[in-house]
Every structure is written in C-alpha cells, then in structure tokens.
C-alpha cells in the first residue's frame, strides 16, 4: 500500500528531535562550490549572497540561517535551496532541497544521502554507476582522439590553403590582366581579319568577272553556233510541215469535186482518216493569226500559215563592245589590286604550307619545282622553307606568328577571341571563390577551410535535409520534386543569445534567409555541432514553425581542452561530452 505524500515530511518533523544535531555527530557533506570549510569551531561562514556571516558550527544544522540557503547544502532545511550529494567514488551532484527526505531515492544521489532521515534505505550504487560512466568516458576518449587527429588534418589544410590563396590571388589577377590585354589585341585583329575577308571576297569577285570576260567570246561563239543549228532544224521542220499541210488541205477539198461522194464513202470506211482530218481542221482553226492593217482595222488569216515556226533575224552583237562595256561598268576603284599577288600567293601567306607554296610556284610558272627554284635571289618561298626546316614540329606558334594568321582569318580570330573571353570568365569565377573564402570566418585555427561547401544530408520522415557547411541548407521531398531553401550560412552562434568565445564560438551555425514560409517567417536552421569522427547529421527537428534545429557532429569541433578522465569534480566536462 502506497502511503500518502504527506506521511514522509510529517515523519521527518516528528523524528527530527531524535536525529543527531551539530556537535553531536559528523557534519554531512558540504557542496564543494562553497569552497574549503574550516574545521575551527570559532570560524565564521559567509553566506554566498553576502547577507550575513554565521558560526561554522551552524552549517548543515537543519536550520536555514542564510537567506539563499547556502548554509544547508547537506539538509532540506531551506526549501528553495539545493542539496549536495557527495557520491563518493563517482561524481557529486546537486538536487533541489524539496527532494530530500521525500521517501524517494533520487537517482542523482547514488550514495543515498538524500534520504538521511532513515525512513527509506537507499542503496549505494555509486561503484556500479562509476564503472559504467568510466566505460563511456573511455569510448568518448577514443572518439575525441580520432576526432582531434582528423581536425589537425583540417587545420594543416587550412594553413596551407590560406598561404596559397595569396599566391593564387596574385596569379589570377595577373592572368586576368594578361587575358584582358590579349582580348583587346584580338578585337583589333578580328577587325583586320573582317576587312581582309571582305577584301578577299572583292578580289574573288573581280577574278570571277575577269574570267567571265575572258571566256565571253568563246561562249558567245558557241551560243551562235548552237542557235544556227536550231535555226536549220526549225527550217527543216517547217518544210516538212508545209508538205503535210498541202496533203491535208488537198484531202479537205476532195468533197467539193466530182469525186466527193466517193471520198465521203472512203471516210466512212476509214474512220481513222476521218478523225485525222477533223483534228487537222480543229488545229488549223485554233491557230488563226490576226493581222493589223495599215488603216487600223484587223483581219484574220485563215490560211493556216500561222502554224509555221518563224525566226526573226537577230542582229549580231559586237562581242568586243560587250566586253568593253562590262569592263567599263566594273568599279575598279573598289578593288585594290596593288597586292593582289600577295593575297593569293601561298609563299607570302603565313597560314599556307610549304607544299602549297611549292605547288603554286611550279603551277604558276608551268615548270618543275627545281626550275621554279633556279633563281634563289627572287624566289619568295625561301623564307617559308627556312622556317619549316628550323621550327620544332612540337612547338606552338608564337604570338607574332599567330597574329599574322589571325589577321587574315576572320573565323579563327573569332574562335580565338571567344576562347579567351571564356577563359577570362573562368579566372574571374575562381577569383570570386577565393575572395569569398577569404571573407569567411573559418574557425579559430582555420579548421573549417577544407569543409567549406561540403554537403551532408539525412532523411527524416518524408523529407531529405541537406546542409553545405558555410553554404546552403535545403529541404527536398523524398518522393521527388523541387527543393526548398532553408537559408544560407549567415553567422556563427546560436539562434538566441550570443556566440561563445574561443573554440566555443564555433559550436553553432546559423542558416538564415530561406524561402518564406506561408503565414510565417523565412525559413532558417540552427545547427548545433558536437565532436565526432565523421561529418554527419544526427537529428532534425522543427521546434517552431519554419525554424529548424539540427544536431551535427564533425571532427572540426573536437577540442583538446576537454577532460574526459572521469574526475568526479569536473561535472562541467561530463556535461560537455
């Protein structure tokens, strides 16, 4: 049968006169937070709130002398005070005075000292609890040692990276400056190449026109010859057509003579003949020519002569006059032929090969290669031959050589310009990344340098949560779909309060300014960091609407100052771990 809650306090009150008082028994444990307590009976104890001083013998006498209850840490005399459990062999603990002698063995007092009235016998379990605590501390020590080793690697990386970034900044700035200058040069070369290309097109048009004027007499003669052949063929066809017309006209008139009846009988016996005559009559009627008389009237020619093909005599044009006229109409001023040979001579063009130079030389002179080279002082291919023989085939083209090529090849100039502009953007992006890192707080020893933008994630219920250290935090549905921004890294420290000092400053990250929550704030994440041997999200929660909390472990927050030796007096260290 469970006793009412008021029984134990009442029994304590009734039995208090029977309990040992100060001076008659050994004083109970005093909280170490009170400092060293003198054993001199004449000494004085100063209350922690400074309200008064009392005789040392009044400590733990079951009477509350100090307003703050600091004199009764070993009894329950002060209801708003605390009771200190020594927990010998383990770690001391404090509990509210209201839980002393309440008939319940408090688990924080493994030595059972909270029930000193004797109404309840609490076993001393400190040895067992201390052993389990030590086992956990040993495990934590292993984790800490591994974490510190990993963190040292982060620190070493950060030191080298920071030193290297200064050189990278100088190098990238120099590269951007050089590329920018080269881009300006290429723009000029591209303009020259465009002009050269337009000039080449004009030269080719000029050459085509010249070729056309050269071949025009031959083509005109061929055309005249062909026309004469056609005229002869047409005249032959007209002769045969005239003979056929006379035969058909004669047949058409037979019905008007005495033999007409016999002819009509013939037509009836020969339907094909009748059909042929009918088609001829229809054809002749459909080719009635209309002539204009001198008086302005018109009349039809029903003789059928219009069925013949007629050719009007064309006046012969003076081919020399035509070519002369075409030559005069060409705007010679638009084409500069001063260096015409240079533009088409592969021995001068730097982009042409030696083979093309030799081939062109032989072709232009209608001689063999050796004949073309018999004049060593005038042959323009010597320079290209010397360059081809002395150049390393694996060596890239010099800038001056490249310029000579690009100024005469618009497509190559445009491609080279696009390539360098793309390279400049790449350098600028790298420069922005380095400057961004330089502007970040990367930890007390630069340990977060290697982890910048490293992303870790975790599935929680229907979502996948991801954070990128000092970068972005996102939330994505596990069944697919777009992600939701939970914010970007904004500062070190907790959501509320101020960041700690030293290494403690880097135990919290804040990601803020995420996607706005409907009828609520913008999404944000507070990340609480703890020592671990891997970078990992341990848990995700949403304490308030659109305000998330993550527990994350990382070697970057392992601190060598943490004491995991199991010292009973170092409760702060135990709580930290």
Image (tube, grey):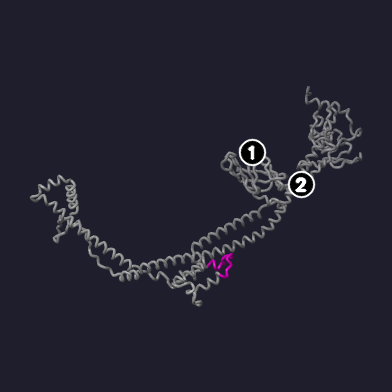
Q: Position of residue 379 (x, y in %)?
A: 49, 75
Place residue 182 in its image quadrant.
bottom right
| Secondary structure beneath label 1 | strand
Q: Residue at x 53, y 64 (%)?
A: 186
Residue 460: give its label. Answer: 1
Q: Position of residue 144 (x, y in %)?
A: 76, 45
Disc 2 versus disc 1: distance between alpha carbons?
30 Å
Q: Does the segment drawn in magenta span residue 401? A: yes
Q: Does the segment drawn in magenta span residue 226? A: no
Q: Nearer the viewer, residue 569 or 51?
A: 569
Q: Earlier in the sequence, mark 2 or mark 1?
A: 2
Q: Residue at x 63, y 44 (%)?
A: 466
Place residue 537 in its image quadrant.
top right
Residue 145: give its label. Answer: 2
Q: Position of residue 222 (x, y in %)?
A: 31, 65
149 on left or right of 20:
left
Residue bounds of the magenta highlight: 389-403
* Residue sitting at the far left: 258
Q: Residue at x 33, y 66 (%)?
A: 219
| Secondary structure beneath label 2 | helix
Q: Is residue 175 visible?
A: yes
Q: Nearer the viewer, mark 2 or mark 1?
A: 2
356 on left or right of 282:
right
């Amino acid at each position: 049968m469970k006793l009412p809650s008021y029984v134990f306090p009442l029994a304590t009150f009734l039995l208090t006169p029977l309990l040992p008082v100060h001076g008659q028994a050994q004083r109970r444990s005093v909280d170490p937070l009170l400092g060293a307590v003198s054993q001199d009976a004449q000494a004085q104890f100063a209350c922690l709130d400074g309200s008064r001083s009392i005789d040392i013998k009044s400590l733990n006498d079951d009477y509350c002398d100090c307003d703050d209850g600091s004199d009764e840490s070993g009894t329950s005399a002060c209801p708003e005070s605390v009771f200190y459990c020594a927990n010998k062999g383990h770690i001391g603990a404090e509990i509210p005075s209201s839980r002393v002698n309440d008939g319940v063995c408090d688990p924080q007092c493994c030595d059972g000292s909270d029930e000193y009235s004797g109404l309840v016998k609490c076993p001393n379990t400190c040895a067992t609890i201390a052993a389990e605590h030590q086992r956990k501390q040993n495990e934590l020590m292993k984790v800490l040692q591994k974490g510190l080793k990993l963190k040292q690697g982060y620190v070493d990386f950060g030191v080298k990276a920071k030193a290297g970034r200064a050189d990278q900044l100088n190098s990238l700035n120099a590269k951007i400056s050089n590329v920018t200058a080269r881009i300006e040069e290429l723009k000029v070369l591209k303009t020259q190449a465009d002009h050269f290309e337009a000039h080449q097109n004009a030269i080719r048009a000029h050459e085509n026109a010249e070729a056309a004027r050269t071949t025009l007499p031959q083509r005109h003669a061929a055309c005249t010859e062909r026309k004469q052949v056609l005229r002869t063929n047409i005249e032959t066809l007209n002769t045969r057509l005239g003979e056929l017309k006379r035969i058909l006209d004669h047949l058409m008139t037979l019905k008007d003579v005495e033999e007409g009846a016999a002819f009509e009988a013939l037509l009836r016996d020969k339907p094909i003949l009748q059909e042929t005559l009918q088609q001829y009559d229809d054809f002749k009627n459909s080719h009635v020519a209309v002539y204009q008389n001198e008086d302005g009237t018109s009349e039809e020619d029903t003789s059928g002569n219009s069925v013949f093909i007629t050719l009007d005599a064309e006046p012969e044009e003076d081919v020399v006059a035509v070519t002369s006229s075409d030559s005069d109409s060409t705007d010679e001023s638009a084409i500069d032929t001063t260096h015409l040979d240079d533009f088409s001579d592969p021995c001068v063009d730097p982009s042409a090969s030696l083979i093309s130079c030799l081939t062109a030389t032989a072709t232009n002179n209608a001689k063999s290669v050796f004949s073309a080279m018999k004049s060593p002082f005038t042959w323009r291919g010597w320079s290209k031959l010397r360059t081809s023989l002395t150049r390393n085939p694996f060596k890239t083209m010099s800038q001056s050589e490249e310029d000579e090529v690009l100024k005469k090849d618009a497509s190559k100039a445009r491609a080279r310009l696009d390539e360098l502009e793309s390279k400049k953007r790449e350098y600028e992006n790298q420069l922005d990344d380095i400057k961004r890192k330089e502007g970040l707080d990367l930890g007390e020893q630069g340990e977060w340098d290697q982890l910048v933008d490293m992303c870790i994630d975790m599935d929680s219920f229907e979502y996948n949560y991801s954070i990128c250290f000092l970068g972005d935090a996102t939330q994505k549905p596990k069944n697919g779909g777009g992600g939701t921004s939970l914010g970007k890294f904004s500062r070190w420290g907790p959501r509320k309060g101020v960041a700690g000092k030293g290494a403690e400053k880097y135990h919290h990250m804040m990601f803020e300014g995420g996607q706005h929550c409907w009828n609520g704030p913008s999404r944000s994440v507070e990340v609480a960091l703890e020592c671990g041997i891997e970078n990992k999200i341990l848990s995700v929660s949403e304490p308030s609407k659109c305000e998330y909390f993550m527990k994350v472990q990382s070697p970057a927050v392992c601190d060598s100052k943490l004491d995991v030796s199991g010292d009973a007096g170092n409760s702060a260290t135990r709580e930290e771990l």
